[in-house]
Image: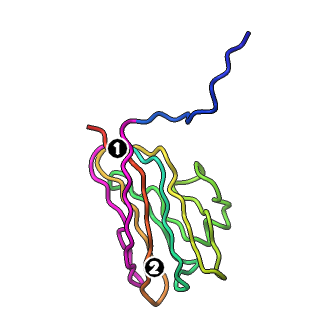
Amino acid sequence: MMDFPDFSRVQYKRYGTPMRGYDTISCDPGAWTSLALISGKGQIYCGFVKSESANATENDHVGVELDGQAIGNIAFQTAINCGLWRSYNYSIYMLVFDVVTPRVVVGLTPNYTFETTYEVKYWNAGALAFDVDIEIVYTLIQ
């Protein structure tokens, strides 16, 4: 008889106690704004970037840097056109893009490990500043 894995539990390896970081940051127009910078050796469990501003546009970007190297930087419209609607396709993925409400939510793909830093940035392509929320669940390894 064949033994099957227990799929009722999370299947990725955890390296430490989860910590939660969250903040609301004002993003100036025409500039990259750092939303979160985690220093040390660790792992990302999950996270998201959210804006409910009518000033967010389809040309805005979310970027991720891992150990000082850009691993993802994509405009919302490009992410939609490429079908990035679930994790594991890219370092970020679209959860919601609604210009009527307005609301934009971008997921941060889990399970990235980093040796020195993990940073999330936002590019405001519009003409006005607005607030962006970020939440990340991560761990630091001693």
Residue nearest the observer in this picture, 64 or 44: 44
The structure residue drawn at horizontal position 61% and vertical position 69%, both measured from the top left corner, is 78
Q: Which mark is residue 42?
A: 1
Position of residue 13 relative to residue 135, above or below, is above
Quadrant in the picture for residue 85: bottom right
Instruction: Please name the amino acid that badge 1 sits on.
Output: Gly
Q: Which residues are magenta?
A: 15-42
The structure residue drawn at horizontal position 44% and vertical position 74%, both measured from the top left corner, is 132
- Is residue 19 shown left or right of residue 89? left
Q: What is the chief secondary structure element of the magenta stretch?
A: strand
- Is residue 101 shown left or right of residue 14? right
The structure residue drawn at horizontal position 48% and vertical position 81%, both measured from the top left corner, is 125
In the rendered structure, does residue 38 fall within the stretch colored magenta? yes
Outermost residue toward the right in this view: 1
- Between disc 1 and disc 2, whose residue precedes? 1
Classed neighbour count for the residue bearing mark 1: other residues with Cα under 10 Å, few (<14), some (14–19), many (≥20)? many
Outermost residue toward the top in this view: 1
Q: Which mark is residue 124?
A: 2
Q: Nearer the viewer, mark 1 or mark 2?
A: 1
